[in-house]
Every structure is written in C-alpha cells, then in structure tokens.
Image (spheres, rainbow, N blue to C red):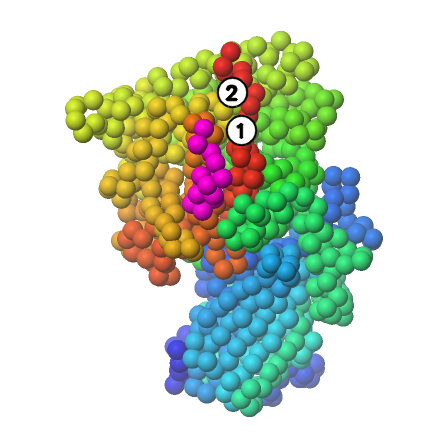
C-alpha cells in the first residue's frame, strides 16, 4: 500500500509549529546547538518538543507471536545475582512483527510499549507494523526443528516488495539489556529507515520524558526513583528527535513530507511527563539491493549512567557472544541446557503430531513466565488482554500476575516435563499469597489464598475462590508423592500452610478484606474458576474434594486427628454432587420421545438447588439466565481428579449436551476447526452466555467502550486438552484403550491444541469461533484473538495432555481420591 505524503502539514502539526517553534528556538543556546550537531541535517535546532502530553497511551496488541527472557539457574532455590552468575531481569514480547511490551525489574513492570521502524521512500511513509507481511521463526533449533531457545528471527516484507527488514531478538543473560540485530534490504532506490520507540516506563505511558543525547536515546519518568531506558546502536543516526505521540513525534513529522525535520532534543525541561516517542533516522539506502545492518541494544538501569553502561557493554560484547550465551555456552547455562535437563521431553515428543515443536516451545514459554526477583512466582500471561484498546495512563499488571489456579496448572506441567526444581520453588512461594492474620487489612478466618496478586505479594483482587485454596494442597501432595518433598518437609508445610487451607475448606468463615466483607460456607464458593459467580460449582467442588483427601493423607502422616474430618467431608460432598449441581428439570436435557429430562451438570447452582429457576448473576454485559440453561465443561474436573468415574451416566449426559452444535450460538459450547492434516478437531467455549470477548455486532474489543450485551467469549484452546484428558480416562475405564485408539486421541486432541498455536508456537487464551463481526483484525477460524497470548494455562494443559498420552494415564489424576471415596 502506498501511503502518500501529506501535501501540507496537518492542522495540528501546523498549530504546534506556529505556537511553539519561535519560543523553543529562543530557548536554545549556541552551545546546545553545537553539542547536538552530530545528529543534525539542518542548522535549525529546537530543544523542547511541543504538544504535551500527547494522545492517551494504550498497551500493545496482546496476541503475541513470541516472548523471551534469559534462562537463569537457581542458586539454593532462589535467583541470586552474583558476579559469576549475573541475573538478567528483562522480558520481552513480539506482536504484529515488532517488539512490544518489554519488562525490567519485576516481570509486570513494563518499560516499552513498542519499538518498530518507519520506512520512507519515493512517495510513501510506511510503518513496519501496518505495511509489511511478517514471519517469525526460532533462531536456535535442533535437527528436527524443535526450538532450543527463546531467540527469534523476524522477517517483515513490504506488501509491495520495496524493502525487507530482518530482525534477531534476544536478551543478554549477563546484563539488564535486550539485543536486536537488524538488516534492512532495499529493493528500490531511496529507502530510508527510521527507528521509532514508544516508552512506557515503570508500567505507565502517561508520565514519560524522552531525550536525544548525541547518539543515544533516553527515556525515564518524572519520578525520582524512575527506571531509565537507554537505546544505542552501532550505526550512527543521521538525525533524531523526541516528541509527544500523535502531536510532535517522528511519525507525525514524517507523514508531512517524508523527512525527519523536527529535531526536538527533549520532551521536558520542567520534569513534566507525557506519552512520548523517540525517532532516529538511519542512512538512506540509495540504490536497489543496498543493505544496512546494525546491532541495537536497549539497556535498563536505576539511573542514566548504569543504563547507558549496560547498553554499551552489551553492544561491545557483540551479537555472536550474546546470542551464544543466551543459548548456552561453556560459561553460561542457557536455554538449551534447561531443555536438556528435562528428561521426559524426548519420549513425550513421540506422542505429538509435530515432532515435539510445540512441546519444546511450551517448556520454554512456561519457564519464561516466572519472576526473577521472587523465585517461583508464576504469572498467567506476559500480556495485557486487548492491550491496544486498554489505557496505559495508570499502571496495570493485566495477566502478568499470580493466580493460584493458573499457578497450579503450570506447576503440574513443570512436573510433567521433568523439572523438579521449579514446582518446588513455586510451591514454597505460595505461602506469600496465603491469607494470614497479619495480612494487611485482613480481618476474619485465615487459610485461603488471595485471588490475584503482584509477584511481590501485593494484593490486587480479594475474592474467595475455594479451588484456589484447594490446589496448593493438591500440589503439595503431588510433590510429596514424587519424592520432591520428603516426609519431614511435607509435614512442616502441612503445619505452616496446608492445614490452615484444609480447615478453611471445612469450616469457611468470615472474610473481610478490601471490598470483600462476607461469610464463606463451603462448598459454596464466592467465585468459581471464572471469577464471576457464587454458589455450588462442579469444577470448584472437584478441587475441594481432591484437596480434602490430599490433606487427609498428609494429616495421617503427621498423626493429626483432622484426617478423618477431611475424608468424611470429602465423601459427603461427593454424595451431594447430584443434589446440589445436577438438574433433572432442565430444558436442554429434554428427551425427544417423552417429557422427561436427562440429568446434567449445570455451570453453577447459586443456592445448591439446581432444579429451580434461580438465575446466575449478570456478568460481562450479559444478563443472568436460568441456571439450567448454562452448560460448562467444568464437571470434567470431577473425572480428572478421580472424584467421579468417567463412565458415570450423568457425566456422559453432560458431555453429550456440551457437544450439541445445534444450540443457539449464545448457549452453544462446542465448535469445530480444521487441523493441519485436514481433519476436524474440537474447540470449546467456557460456558454458554459467556460475554468475555469481542462484540459480535461492532467488532470492538472486550469492554472497549463499556460492556455490551453483544460481547461474546470465544473458544478457549485448553478445553480441547481437558476433553482429551476425559476421553483418555473414558477409554481406560471402558477397556477400549489400544494403540489405535490412543493414536486417534492424539490426532484429535493433541493435534487439536497444536492447531491453535500461532506461527511463533504461542498458544492463546481464546481463538476465533467465526461468530459475528471478525473485528478490525479480520480473524480467521481458530486464530488466536487479542485476549491474551501466550496463556500459561494453555501451554501447561498441552504439556500435561502429551504426558498423559505418553503414560496412558491422566497426569492430574489423584489415585488416593478414588481410593478414599470408594471406601
């Protein structure tokens, strides 16, 4: 697409020039003019950029095609920054072919919204993100093509074939910096590349200050304790400018006449922040087939000097040395060494349909989503859902935070792939997010786990979700059974963390923290696994029962008399499943030949009476409906953990209804997609009447202009894994598991999850189901949406599914649960 120059400056640009230019020029001393001459192409030097504060900042597109960070080994179960083992605390993400949110310090502390290139030429101004076709691949792979590190090669080709940009991206394991090797190739004469950087320092984009200091680009906030970000390259800029996004930045300037002729040195001389951008021009490629290569480094520090020194040191080390250290060499334990430590991966690869490519990528992705200040803090996703429509004026963690439920899924996946260190460290971390009497602002009964926290334990959301209280107990039991925790260790953890949690599952109690002032009466949960509804939930109750049995088993080890209390309650809850969560009057279960209704599990029963017209709460723009109208596959967790047999008739009835594709789209759960081998694979929504997704009429992102009734939650790929686990359990239970049936399960469910991965092998939270407006992104069936990619839970479910197929046994199964409940 040719994007022609504007014949005149835009109205806003003209206004900026008229009102600020004379004042800015008068503020420049001859000395300032002289010191900055190295980056000037004209004699006109303007110190201060006009147009503050710029347009409202947002985050970047959330559908990441890559994420990365350096691998760091533990030292005594922690990340310890030492001269012989420096810890790099930089994470990055890639979307739409460009570098997006990049974090430094804590894993949620973003410093950059995006870094891309603006390309000018004969009659056009292109942005790399909008005017190229992008491909991504891994820089380091084994002989079968499986990724060995989170280092990427991106090739962005101009839609009309005028130029190509190749970028290699990874971090420096010895320093707090990111390296990018860039190669521009011109296919016609007169191509000029420009670097464009939009900082969002310390997790906000509204309070930044940008400056050009010779050949260095610098950004920080007005806060005295601000992080400083420095960008240097080993090819000099021809010119550079700092400005406010949408008013005086380089993109606005270039769209005028294709020339970077505003050379603003800084966006503030009074410590006032805004939404800023830095733009730097590189030499023009004057002839067709000319190329330009350079290394670019982003360095971070707590002050300008350390940030600059870090960037320069990485640049001095050079591309080859930094990349090899990232992968792993004779002096660095890198990503290839981590993968080599995961003994089960090779055998597990035989139970995939892509020879283990997604399996290896998933192992890397899960480990990358751990904080390096608070070892074991596993986040949900290195993204902000629907980020490009979410304000970045005030900092938000998005999904870069700890939920004990997602945390459990990841810890179990680490175990499945043979990592015994990370799940142990993660389990020990959980104590930080358990509610205790000394939890700030808390009054009431302790023992439950916080809904959502920052990785440093700072409280963010305070709902009580009983599955999140049960899962740490379940994880502790699994670690004990695996020999990762010995008898003495699990006994101590039982006293310190697990017993208070189990007692809360038995007794509940009063809770008062922040907005939350309520009484919890298990098994009724204040919120179920979708954090939206109160009542009796099959998935939550499955975890409660498994947690109680696991607690009982450990209690017997320590000779705690509560052991029998836990098992007695678990058996009671199992007996009550059908009376509290199974409807026999629901219209969805109506038989074709009579007026009776086949029993099935409801999503949740607000009052534990599933045969009434009780309505669920309004949520995500959707009005609450009769509880009997809403299907949710959460009942499959009852089979997964060993609470109910896979052949149970109510389970089978419920599965049949989940599979009914004749339901109206609002109530329908199952959709079908084409796999890479041409077969049909299944995908499932969370539940009927789900509103956590894009608007079907307008195509707007979730809650982009407030919640609407037309919002629709889409297919979540990890449900394909959940269903695969159920089908494996069913085949084992009815004696039909053979080599052929196992391969059929792999072809359907393992391949199904692989189908949802994008080109960078990232698995999404949600995938497009084809219903309604395909949005501004023109989504295709099965393509990940802008909700959150990669989602750790999805990658964890995939790893566990492959391990389950390899073992021919559900990985999350608790044999002690089945044994105790059968007595």
Residue 674 visible in the current orientation? yes
Image position of 707 (left or right of 376):
left
Residue at position x 43%, y 56% in the image: 676
Binning the other alpha carbons within 10 Å of mark 2 as few (below 14), some (14 to 19) or many (20 upward) gives: some
Dominant secondary structure, magenta? helix
- Image coordinates of residue 143 in percent, x first then y, are 63, 60
Magenta span of residues? 735-748
Q: Residue at the front extreme?
A: 739
Residue at position x 53%, y 32% in the image: 809
- Image coordinates of residue 356 in percent, x first then y, are 57, 51
Which residue matches tag 1? 813
State yes or no: discs 1 and 2 in contact (Cβ < 8 Å). Answer: yes
Which label was assigned to residue 681? none
- Image coordinates of residue 732 in percent, x first then y, are 47, 30
Residue at position x 45%, y 20% in the image: 523
Binning the other alpha carbons within 10 Å of mark 1 as few (below 14), some (14 to 19) or many (20 upward) gives: many
Residue at position x 35%, y 32% in the image: 655
Q: Is residue 419 above or below residue 194?
A: above
- Between 126 and 306, the one lying in front of the other is 126
Q: Is residue 195 above or below residue 77?
A: below
Residue 609 occupies which quadrant of the picture?
A: top left
Is disc 2 placed on a helix, strand or loop? helix
- Between 614 and 252, the one lying in front of the other is 614
Which residue matches tag 2? 818
- Between 93 and 307, the one lying in front of the other is 93
Q: Is residue 119 above or below residue 763?
A: below
Residue 218 visible in the current orientation? no
Mark 2 or mark 1, which is nearer the start of the sequence?
1
- Between 770 and 128, the one lying in front of the other is 770
Q: Quadrant of the N terminus?
A: bottom left
Residue 151 occupies which quadrant of the picture?
A: bottom right
Q: Residue at the left extreme?
A: 594
């Amino acid at each position: 697409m040719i994007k022609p120059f504007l014949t005149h400056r835009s109205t806003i640009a003209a206004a900026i020039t008229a009102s600020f230019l004379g004042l800015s020029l008068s503020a420049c001393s001859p000395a300032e003019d002289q010191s900055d001459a190295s980056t000037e192409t004209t004699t006109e030097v303007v110190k201060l950029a006009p147009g503050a504060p710029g347009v409202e900042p947002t985050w970047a597109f959330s559908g990441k095609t890559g994420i990365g960070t350096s691998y760091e080994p533990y030292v005594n179960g922690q990340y310890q920054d030492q001269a012989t083992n420096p810890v790099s605390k930089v994470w990055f993400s890639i979307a739409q072919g460009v570098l997006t949110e990049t974090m430094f310090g804590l894993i949620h502390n973003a410093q950059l919204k995006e870094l891309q290139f603006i390309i000018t030429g004969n009659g056009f101004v292109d942005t790399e993100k909008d005017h190229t076709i992008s491909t991504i691949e891994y820089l380091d792979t084994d002989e079968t093509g499986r990724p060995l590190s989170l280092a990427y090669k991106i090739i962005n080709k101009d839609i009309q074939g005028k130029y190509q940009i190749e970028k290699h991206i990874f971090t420096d394991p010895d320093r707090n910096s990111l390296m990018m090797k860039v190669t521009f190739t011109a296919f016609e004469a007169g191509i000029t590349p420009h670097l464009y950087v939009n900082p969002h320092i310390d997790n906000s984009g509204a309070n930044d200050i940008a400056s050009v200091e010779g050949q260095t680009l610098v950004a920080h906030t007005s806060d005295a304790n601000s992080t400083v970000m420095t960008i240097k390259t080993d090819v000099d800029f021809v010119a550079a400018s700092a400005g406010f996004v949408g008013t005086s930045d380089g993109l606005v300037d270039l769209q005028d006449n294709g020339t970077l002729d505003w050379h603003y040195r800084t966006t503030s001389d009074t410590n006032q922040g805004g939404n800023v951008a830095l733009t730097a021009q590189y030499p023009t490629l004057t002839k067709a087939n000319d190329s330009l290569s350079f290394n670019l480094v982003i360095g971070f520090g707590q002050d300008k000097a350390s940030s600059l020194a870090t960037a320069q040191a990485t640049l001095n080390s050079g591309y080859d040395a930094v990349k090899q250290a990232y992968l792993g060499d004779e002096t660095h334990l890198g990503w290839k060494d981590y993968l080599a430590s995961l003994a089960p991966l090779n055998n597990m690869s035989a139970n995939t349909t892509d020879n283990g490519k997604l399996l290896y990528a998933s192992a890397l992705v899960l480990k990358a989503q751990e904080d390096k200040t608070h070892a074991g803090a596993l986040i949900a996703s290195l993204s902000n859902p629907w980020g490009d429509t979410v304000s970045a004026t005030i900092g938000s963690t998005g999904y870069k935070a700890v939920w004990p439920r997602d945390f459990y899924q990841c810890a179990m996946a680490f175990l499945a792939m043979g990592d015994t260190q990370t799940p142990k460290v993660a389990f020990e971390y959980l104590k930080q997010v358990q509610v205790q009497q000394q939890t700030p602002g808390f009054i009431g009964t302790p023992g439950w786990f916080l809904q959502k926290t920052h990785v440093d334990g700072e409280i963010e959301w305070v709902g009580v979700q009983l599955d999140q209280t049960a899962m740490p107990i379940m994880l502790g039991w699994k670690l004990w059974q695996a020999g990762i925790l010995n008898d003495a260790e699990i006994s101590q953890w039982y006293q310190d963390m697990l017993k208070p949690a189990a007692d809360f599952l038995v007794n509940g109690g009063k809770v008062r923290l922040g907005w939350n002032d309520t009484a919890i009466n298990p098994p009724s949960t204040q919120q179920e696994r979708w954090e939206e509804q109160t009542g009796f939930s099959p998935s939550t109750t499955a975890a409660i029962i498994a947690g109680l049995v696991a607690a009982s088993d450990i209690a017997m080890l320590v000779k705690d008399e509560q052991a029998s209390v836990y098992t007695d309650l678990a058996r009671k809850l199992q007996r009550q499943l059908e009376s509290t969560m199974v409807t026999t009057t629901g219209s969805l279960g109506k038989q074709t030949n009579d007026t009776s209704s086949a029993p099935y599990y409801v999503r949740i029963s607000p009052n534990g009476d599933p045969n009434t017209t009780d309505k669920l709460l309004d949520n995500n723009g959707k009005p609450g409906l009769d509880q009997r109208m809403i299907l949710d596959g959460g009942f499959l967790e009852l089979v997964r953990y060993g609470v109910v047999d896979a052949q149970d008739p109510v389970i089978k009835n419920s599965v049949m209804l989940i599979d009914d594709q004749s339901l109206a789209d609002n109530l329908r759960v199952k959709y079908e997609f084409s796999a890479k081998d041409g077969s049909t694979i299944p995908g499932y929504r969370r539940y009927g009447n789900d509103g956590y997704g894009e608007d079907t009429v307008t195509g707007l992102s979730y809650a982009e202009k407030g919640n609407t009734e037309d919002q629709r939650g889409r297919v979540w790929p990890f449900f394909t894994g959940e269903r695969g686990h159920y089908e494996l359990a069913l085949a084992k239970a009815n004696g039909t598991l053979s080599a052929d049936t196992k391969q059929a399960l792999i072809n359907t469910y393992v391949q199904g999850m692989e189908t949802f991965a994008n080109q960078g092998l990232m698995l999404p939270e949600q995938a497009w189901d084809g219903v309604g407006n395909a949005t501004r992104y023109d989504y295709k069936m099965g393509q990940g949406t802008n909700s959150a990619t990669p989602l750790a839970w999805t990658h964890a479910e995939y790893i566990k599914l492959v391990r389950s197929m390899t073992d021919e046994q559900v990985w999350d199964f608790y044999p002690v649960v089945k044994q105790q409940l059968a007595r």
